[in-house]
Amino acid sequence: AACACVGAAYEALENRPRSVAWLVRALRLDAGCAEALDFVVDRRLLSADEEAWLRDETAAALEGSDRAWVAAVYGARLGCRDADPAGDAARFEALERVHGLGDNQEVLRARAERCYTAHDYRGAYEVARRVRERDPYDFGCAP
């Protein structure tokens, strides 16, 4: 968590390379550090290739019985800008069927982001509307 705080501080100082380095270090040390993941994803600090690399690295670093579903959620959040729509379908289907997370707020936000980046604005609006109906104070996904 300390590495995530240092990364956030460097971002506030507008030193993006050091911010990214510290946030990635936070995820390497603790793959379950949600603060670092949120910071990286919400501010789009990584390129699509770097996101794919980080997704693979964090999935390998996760431990315990929750490894599969946490890796699937990270994959959905970090894979919003992938150019492979078939991979998206498989990623979200695994979250819905295997892990039962189809109505999870994080998963719905990731799905709305993916629809938006794929230029499916109607789909993005519908998913964002569902998110806002469930939690009107979730500003991470505004319709």
Image (cartoon, rainbow, N blue to C red):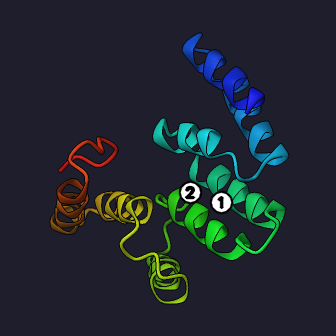
Report the mark closest to the observer, 1 or 2: 2
Q: Which residue is mark 2?
A: 78
User: Which residue is at a point 67% across and 50% down the rendered structure image?
Assistant: 50
Please say if 68 is above or below 121: below
- In the picture, measured across the screen, residue 52 lies left or right of residue 139, that is right
Amino acid identity at mark 2: Leu
Dot 1 or dot 2, earlier in sequence? 1
- Packing grade of label 1 (10 A; few <14, some 14-19, many >=20) is some
Q: Is residue 24 left or right of residue 124?
A: right
Label 1 is placed on what type of residue?
A: Ala
Q: What whole-number distance in Å separates the C-alpha atoms at marks 1 and 2?
A: 7 Å
Residue 112: quadrant of the picture: bottom left
Relative depth, front residue between 85 and 8: 8
For label 2, the crowd category at 10 Å Cα-Cα, with few meaning under 14, some 14 to 19 and many 20 or more, is many
Quarter of the picture holding the N terminus: top right
| Residues at discs 1 and 2 in contact (Cβ within 8 Å) | yes
Q: Position of residue 125 (x, y in %)?
A: 17, 60
In front: 37, or 2? 2
Identify the residue position indicated by label 1 in the image.
52
- Measured from the top left, where is residue 101 in percent x and y? 46, 75
- Please tell me in which quadrant of the rendered image residue 134 appears: bottom left
SS assignment at label 2 = helix
Q: Residue furthest top?
A: 13
Name the spot of residue 140 as percent of width and height, x first.
Answer: 34, 44
**SS of the residue at dot 1?**
helix
**Which residue occupies the foreground of this view, 17 or 123?**
123
| 39 relative to 60, above or below | above
Residue 88 vertical position relative to residue 46 in the rendered view, above or below: below
